Image: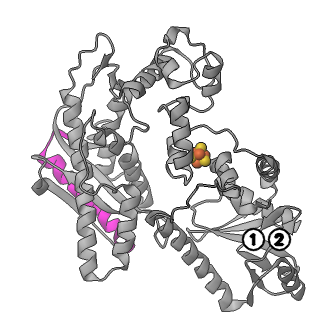
Amino acid sequence: MFIQASDARSWRKCKRRVWFDNNPPADFVETEAGEFEQLIIENGNCLEKKYLEQFKQTLTVVEATSQEHTKALMKDGVDVIYQGIFIKENIIGKPDFLIRQSSGAYQPADVKLAHDADKIEIQTQLGVYRFLMETKLPALAYLATGEIMEIGDEANEKVSAYLASMQEILGAKTPPVARFSESKCRECPYQTICKPEFESKGELTLLYGLESRAAPGLEEQGYKDIKKLSVADPENIADVPFLKGHEKKQRIVLQAQSYMDGNFRQLSEITLPGGTWIHFDIEDYPLTESGQKHVYLWGFLKPNYDRADFDYIWTDAEASDRDGWEQFLAQVSEYGGQYPDLILAHFSHHEKTTIELYAKRYDMESHPVVTWLLGDESPLFDIQKPVKESLVLPIAGYGLKYICKHPNLVNFQWHEADSGSQWSIVQFARYLEEGAQGRARLKQSILDYNFDDVLATRKLELWLRALPNEFASIQAA
Ligand code: SF4
C-alpha cells in the first residue's frame, strides 16, 4: 500500500478516515462530491490552471506521465515539469510543479486554495515532496492570495511523524479506533458507517463539549457510555484532562441527560438587553480573485419583524467591497439616529470579527461608527452567548440552525431546507456566472435565506424571553 503525500489532508482530519480511504469498506457506496465540495475542487483547478498558464508565458512546461518520465525531463533540464511523480519505497508524491533553478536543481511546488501555508497538512505534504526529492531547497506553496510561501526544514518533524503514523495505519488490518467530533464527522464520507456505531455504543464524544482527550479518563472511572454518565453525580467524577472543576462536570452530566431525553436544561437566568432590537446577519464569499473574503450581503430585520421590515445592502462585485462596507456603516448610523436604544443582535462572533476585519482592511478603525460598534457602548449583542452560558441543549453543536430547527427548542424551519453557509457560497458562485435573468432568481433565493437567518435570531430571542426563568433546581423542558 502506498503512502500518498496528498493523504496528509485526510490523515490530519482523522486516522480512521485515511484508513478507510485506503481500505474502502465492502458495502460503502461513494457518493458524488456535494455542490460545495465540487465548487472548491473547481476553484482549486482554476487556480492551478492560472499558475500553469503564467509559467507557460515565459518558460517551457512539460507534463510528466510517470516517475521515469519525470527523471528524464529533469535530466533534460526542462524549465517546469507539471505533475511530476516521485516514488521511494511505498511513499509517493506528485507535486503540481517542479521548477528548475539556475543551479539546475528542481524545487517542488503545489497550488493551494488557502490563505496561508501554516496548516500542518500543507507543510506535511510539501515536506514529503522534499523528502522524496532529497532536496534542501524549500518547497513552494502558491496560495489563493497570490502569495508564494516557502516550506523548509521546519516541516521535517511533521513529515517523520506523518510517515511513521501512516506506516502504522496502513499496516493495520482493522480501522483505527476513533472518537466522534461533530465538525470532523459531519463532512466525512464515512459518517454513515461510523455514526451508527458511535450511537449504538453511546460514545461519550457524541456529547457537545466533551473533548476526545477527556473521554478515556471518564471511561477509566466507569463512565463508559452516555447513559452511565447521565446518572453520575458530578461530585464523584475525578478531574480528567480537559474536564476539571465542578461547573464543567455538572454541565457534561446535564449534557448527557439532555442527550438521553431530548430536552434542554437551564442553568441560570437569562437577561436579554432591553431596547429596540434589529437582527443582523452577513453573507460573505471567500473564493474571490484577491483571496480576501467579500461580504456581499449585510442583512437587517427591524421592527415589526415582517418581510417588509427586511433591509439589506448588496454589492456583488468584489470591486464594490468598500462601497458595501461604507453603506453598512451609513445604515447602522441611520438606525442609531432612529433608535437611540438600538440593539444590533447577531448570532456568534462572526459579525463582530468581520466588522473588525473591514475596519482594518480600509484603515477605518477610528471612524466614529466603527468606534461606536466596537466600543464599550456598542449596540452589538451576540445572542449565542446567553444560550451557551445558561442552557444545556440536546444538540450536537450550538449553531443557529441546530438550535432553531430542533422541535423541542425554537422549532423554526428555513424555507430552503438545505440552506446554510456553504449553500449560500454555492448560490453566490452560481450568481456570479449567470446572466441577468438567472441572477435575479439566485439573488432572490439568497435574500430569502438571509431573511430566514435574521428571522431565526428573532425567533430565538422570543424563545429565550419566553423561558420561565424559574430554575431553583435544574429544569427539563
Ligand atoms: S466519520 Fe468521523 S470517525 Fe469516522 S472516519 Fe469520518 S471523521 Fe473519522
Q: Nearer the viewer, residue 367 or 171?
A: 171
Q: Is residue 23 left or right of residue 130?
A: left
Q: What secondary structure characterizes most of the magenta part?
A: helix
Q: Name the residue located 18 percent from the left edge and 28 percent from the top edge.
A: 466
Q: Nearer the viewer, residue 128 or 298?
A: 128
Q: Name the residue located 70 percent from the left edge and 62 percent from the top edge.
A: 6
Q: From mark 1 to mark 2, how far is it between C-alphas?
A: 6 Å
Q: Which residues are magenta?
A: 317-344
How is the model colour-coded?
Answer: one colour
Numbered label tally: 2
Q: Relative to 344, is 92 above or below?
A: below
Tell me the number on the disc at residue 86. 2
Q: Amino acid at mark 1?
A: Lys
Q: Is residue 469 left or right of residue 132?
A: left
Task: Look at the numbered disc 1 and say if its residue's Cβ is closer than 8 Å to ligand 1.
Answer: no
Which of the 4 image quadrants contains residue 56?
A: bottom right
**Image position, residue 439 (x, y; %):** 28, 76
**Image position, residue 166 (x, y; %):** 77, 51
Q: Relative to 216, is 231 above or below?
A: above
Q: Name the residue located 35 percent from the left edge and 29 percent from the top edge.
A: 262
- Residue lying furthest front: 27
**Image position, residue 453 (x, y; %):** 27, 50
Q: Is residue 13 left or right of residue 404?
A: right
Q: Nearer the viewer, residue 393 or 380?
A: 393
**Image position, residue 114 (x, y; %):** 58, 62
Which residue has dot 1 on it? 94
The C terminus sits in image quarter: top left
User: Helix or strand or loop: what does disc 1 sit on?
Assistant: loop
Q: Amino acid at mark 2?
A: Phe
* Callout 1–callout 2 Cβ contact below 8 Å: yes
Q: Relative to 458, is 301 above or below?
A: below
